[in-house]
Structure formats: C-alpha cells, structure tokens
Amino acid sequence: MELLSRARRALNTDDDALAAHRNRIRQNFSLLGALALAPFALLHLAGANWPMFAVNVVLVSAMLLNFQALKRGRKPPLPFWFMAVLMVGGACASVLAQGLNGVVWAYPALFMFFFVLPRGLAMVLGLVLLGSVTAASTVSLGWPLAARVFMSLGFVLIMINVVLNVVGELQRALVAQAITDPLTGAYNRRHLQQHLQQHLAQRAAPAGRAAVGDALLAIDIDHFKRINDEHGHAVGDDVLCRLVTAIGARKRGGDLLFRTGGEEFVLLLPRIGLAAAQGVAEELRQRVAQAELVPGQTVTVSIGVGALVPGQDVDAWLRTADAALYEAKRQGRNRVVVAG
C-alpha cells in the first residue's frame, strides 16, 4: 500500500489540468473518433469479420450520438466511462482476433482515457487496459512479445501522466501571473472583481440577498508620493513589499489581500463582525506605523472599513470602503474610519 501511495503522489493523478476543457475535448474526440473508426468498420464488413465489424459499429454510433448531444449542450447519452470500458474490451478482442495488429488500438484508447475522463478514473482504466491487453497478448502472441507490449504500453501510460503534470504546472503558473501583482505578490485588481463576484454568489442567502458578516479594508499608504520623491522609486517599491509582508503577518488564513492601485490595497475579511473588522484595521495601522518601512522614518496608512450589507453588489461594497478611506484621509490620515 505504501508503494502504491508513493506512486500516486509521484504521478499526481489528483491534478486534473484538463477538467475545465473536458467537454470541448469530448465533443472533438467524439467526431474525430467516429470518422477514424468508420473506414475500419467498412474494412471489417468487406472482410466478413463480423465480431470486429460489430464492435466498430457500436463505437462509431455511440461517438456520433455523444457528439450531437455535446454540440447541443446536453449530457451525452452514453457515458464516456462506459465507452472507455467498451474500448478496453474491444482492444482485448482485437488482440485475441488479430494478434499484433490488434495491439495498436490499445495506444489511442489509452490516450483517450486521459483526455475525456477525470484523471483518477483514467488512471484506473489505464491500468486495467495495460493488464488485460498484456494478458490477451500472452495468449495470442506468447510471453516474449507480451512482455514488450507491457513495457511499451506502460511507458506510454507513465509519459502521459508526466506530460499532464507539466501542463498542470504551466496552467497554475499562468493563472498566478494573471491574478497576481508581480511586484508585491498580492492579488491584482482584476482578481479582486472576479473573486468578490464569486464570494457574493457563494454567500447569497436562500432569499437571494447577500449574507452579512464580511468586511473590506481599503488601505492607502499616507504621503507615498513624498516617499518616492525623497528616496526614489526603488525604496517606494520596497515599502510596498514590506507593507504586504506586514499585513500578511496579521491576516487570517481566509483573508485575501489585493493591490488595487499604486499604493492602494484592499483586504477582504470574510465572516467577521464590524467591530472585529475595525479592530483588525486598527491593529494593522499600528503594526505598519511601528514596522519602520523606511529606515529612520515612520510610514503610516489610512484605512477605510466597509461592511457588507444585504442587497449590496460588488461595486457598491467597494465604494463603501473607498468612501471610508477618503474620509480617513480627509480627517488627517493615519487613522481608521468605519463606513456609515
């Protein structure tokens, strides 16, 4: 069991990089698969190879039906896992009936599993295919050739998982670049809008009104232009990074920090009361003032606290926090103001 656990961690089968694109892949695969198998069905018909002809006809028909359903945005009438099971049986029958010529069908079947099925299920069926085709090859070809089939098919199985792992890593890197501020490592403004939309949708009450208990802290570094003018933009950039570090040392695991402008940030505090959010803001203000972001100089922040109220959308919620921030700056900066 430990060996299997280590193998699973190495293959990382829980990382399904193709999940978001699977329906489009299934639609294209269904059409191309039907077109690819149709000539072989005709060849088996001409050769009076009725078992293989029947297998090909079933597969072609199922693929065409699934293609039509997916094209119309409907659920495929024949589940792809069931088609995969049929392909395992078809590959084994092909090996038993045609010998080495039948082995070649195991390779596209293996690829198909990992593109149209969840990766964990694809791995299970891939191992079933590997074992059953090897067993069929032993019967029809003898164990020396069967061993070669096992090694080559197993190598393909491993390489598919290696490639999918690389695809998953590249996908996560691209997503991180798209939603992260490259200087500070905080999330960017684009992700703020997207995340708050999703957050409000998840927190919606059954009656359709947003649930209360969340707060936004709009944070602005006081006199940041003066810091850039006196010390240079390199020091200004360092101040931004140090501020993110200071906030990160205080925020909870579920809190998210976004950089919305040059020296402006928004901190999302989910599931928190207004008094507690005000306390977090005040603690952050004091922490920043004591952090000495610029050696020998005190750097302060102004913070506006905006609590989510029923029926509020994302823009209104952000405006509430911004209005509180502007009031904090109007009152002299280096303070916390609660909206409303």
Image (cartoon, rainbow, N blue to C red):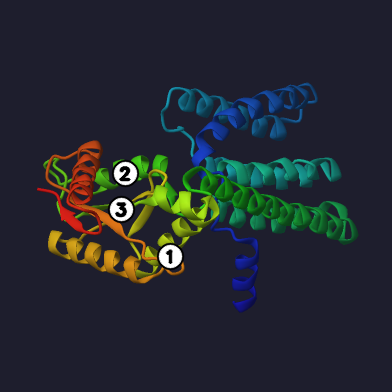
Q: Are marks 3 and 1 in contact (CB under 8 Å)?
A: no
Work out how far the residue at label 3 is from the one at label 2, CA to CA, in angstroms: 22 Å
Q: Dot 1: within a 10 Å radius of its alpha carbon, few (fewer than 14), some, or many (20 or more) residues?
A: many
> Furthest-front residue in view?
230
Query: Looking at numbered disc 1 in the image, what kind of residue is underneath it?
Result: Leu
Could one spot residue 141 in this view of the protein?
yes
- The residue pinned by badge 3 equals 219
SS at circle 3:
strand
3 vs 2, front mark: 3
Q: Position of residue 275 (x, y in %)?
A: 13, 63
Q: Nearer the viewer, residue 152 or 218?
A: 218
Q: Amino acid at mark 2?
A: Gln
Comparing labels 3 and 1, the label whose residue is closer to the camera = 1
Q: CA distance from mark 1 to mark 2?
A: 34 Å
Q: Residue at x 41, y 47 (%)?
A: 225
- Asked whether, in this view, residue 6 is left or right of residue 244, the answer is right
What residue does disc 2 label?
Answer: 198
Which quarter of the figure has residue 215? bottom left
Q: Tell me the kind of residue under disc 3.
A: Ile
Compare residues 80 and 219 and report the one nearer the observer. Answer: 219
Residue 251 appears in view: no
Question: CB atoms at circles 1 and 2 under 8 Å apart?
Answer: no
Residue 87 percent across, percent down from the top left: 64, 42
Specify the label residue 132 is tagged with: none
Q: Which residue is mark 1?
A: 293
SS for dot 2: helix
